[in-house]
Image: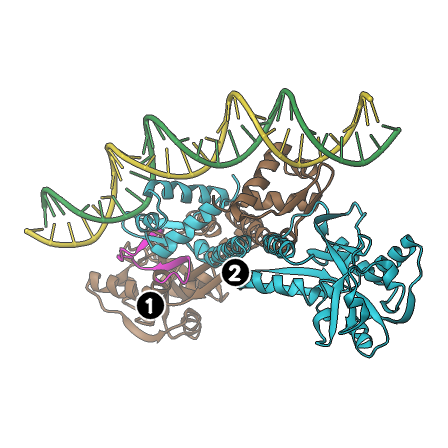
Chain colours: A cyan, B brown, C yellow, D green
Amino acid sequence: MDLNLRHVRAFVSVVQAGSFTRAAALLNLSQPALTVQIQRLEETLAARLLDRTSRTVAPTRLGRELLPVFQRVLRDLDAVVIDTRDLAARRHGVVRVATLPSFAASALAEAIAQFRSEHPRVTFLIKDAIAQRVLDLVRNEDVDLGIVGGDVGDPELSVLYRTSDVLHVIYPRGHPIGALPKVTVDVLAEYPLILMDPATSVRAVVDLAFVGAGRLPTIACEATYMMTAVGMVRAGLGLTILPGSAREIHAEPELRSRLIDDPQFVRSVCLIKKAGRTLPAAAEAFCGTLTGLIVGSPA
Amino acid sequence: MDLNLRHVRAFVSVVQAGSFTRAAALLNLSQPALTVQIQRLEETLAARLLDRTSRTVAPTRLGRELLPVFQRVLRDLDAVVIDTRDLAARRHGVVRVATLPSFAASALAEAIAQFRSEHPRVTFLIKDAIAQRVLDLVRNEDVDLGIVGGDVGDPELSVLYRTSDVLHVIYPRGHPIGALPKVTVDVLAEYPLILMDPATSVRAVVDLAFVGAGRLPTIACEATYMMTAVGMVRAGLGLTILPGSAREIHAEPELRSRLIDDPQFVRSVCLIKKAGRTLPAAAEAFCGTLTGLIVGSPA
DNA sequence: CGCAGCGATAGTTAAAGGTTATGGATCTGA
DNA sequence: TCAGATCCATAACCTTTAACTATCGCTGCG
């Protein structure tokens, strides 16, 4: 016979209750069932643990020595069960997300706020990083979820949701571009541009669009941070092109933005996880909130 | 469903083996049985612990977090089982004995020596004390076994074995008492005696025997330690009366001893334990050795 | 494309565990 | 002191759990 947790629990209960009958009542069990469980436990250990007379029950010396060990084990395991079920019920937990910085400040922040209003004990760990780093973090399972711009071809990663981020052009209030019926590559090629760093996914999209249209942009400046690009526009250095999801496009009251009417000026954004891996319950639930929100937002 | 140790063990094995099939082989179980056990465990915890594809098995984040907890619990319980079974098999253990000092040095010492030659990893804790204290120690279960002189009437104590210790008279070589055909109360009443302290069981027997015979002893001296009494005999202060089991009666080469031919000069000696209590396995076994030895010795 | 390896599922049988009824021992109160 | 109450152990019976064998579906590899 193998040691069984029910038997251990039975033993601890009998000692605490000081009686088979009372312990049985506490465990919602018949008294004979308890008697048998204790017998099995004693068989398993090949030793007597309880001295019973017809009136009293007392642990043997061995029983007294084993009691604290058993109690600790039961306590530990009960804690695990309760904690894990709690986790599964999304009552608490940790969600780790790696994301492009542009998302961290906008849609992601909103999604977290909404999710936490429903699940206040879920905490979030956010890593904002460039696309390549996000992919690595997800691949190594250092994070549960990743949000990257561009397409994901890696079979180790699976795309949970995919949306697109239409690029906007940012210009000073009163700039002639605001009055045009449509903004196209050809229009953008007319003005000096402040573009993002070549390592960014936004820049990759912009470059591809210009190449596709057979035009060359006039690059006034390059910036790594979107806020820098916005500052340059405000300073009159030129126009910039940023994803619609970026908060920065609304940061300056005297700047305007409008979307670019060209299907190539679309950055796809993917919510990804490691392929073949089950997400923690809280992360799973958060995906729902996140995708629900993004669908509803101007894409 | 309730948490079950078999399920926990199954989970740990699968993670360690990295495969259901290999783990099943290690556990001497069929693979489907293992699959079901893991499913049950996941149901119990309401969470997925293992991500399985048809080629690989890997713990989920939760599974990785739970693994060390489970491993510790299993380790603890396995240790308990092994240790306890070892204990039951008398391969090790502690036997606590409270005894009259006269016994500690003689029969008890021999019994322990013999027992330990068969069970070398059993250790003994000996408390030598006067009768009353021995009774208390056994009653409070501070010791497993007690050896007391005199009779035991306490219902809280049960007598496992009872033998009698015939009292001997100790005299110098050449003393006339050595030449008599029989030693009786009347003979003893003729000589000055060194008697044990009135609180001892030996003295109680001696007093009772003299009273029963209607004689009064000539008390030359009283001693608490038997060795003191022996020394006084050697110094010529008189004769003394000691139990046959006492080593002290053979301690001096120029002294002789012979038993007293009077059924009243018998001290009963009892091996006792707390009534209604199961002895630890090693103590139980020791009782056998002890009683076997005493039977064979001159009682 | 077919074979080999792995986990999941289905159906059957053996073991474990539960319940009620009852027995034997001991304490309690009339 | 004797009847009743109380408590643990046992017995007979039934339900639930868990094991095995057989087989399926999927995936990676010649």
Q: Is residue B43 above or below residue A109?
A: above
As for residue B20 lying within the magenta part, the answer is no
In the displayed structure, does residue A108 sit left or right of residue A77?
right
Q: Residue at x 73, y 41 (%)?
A: B56
Crowding at dot 1, Cα within 10 Å, few <14 / some 14-19 / many 20+, comes out as: some
Dividing the picture into quadrants, the one containing residue B123 is: bottom right
As for residue B162 lying within the magenta part, the answer is yes
Dividing the picture into quadrants, the one containing residue C28 is: bottom left
Residue linked to disc 1: B200
Q: Residue C8 or B291: which is nearer the viewer?
A: C8
- The residue range painted magenta reads B140-164
Residue linked to disc 2: A118
Nearest-to-viewer mark from 1 and 2: 2
In the displayed structure, does residue A239 sit left or right of residue B75?
right
Q: Residue at x 51, y 57 (%)?
A: A79
Q: Is residue B133 above or below residue A61?
A: below
Amino acid at the residue labelled 2:
Glu
Amino acid at the residue labelled 1:
Thr
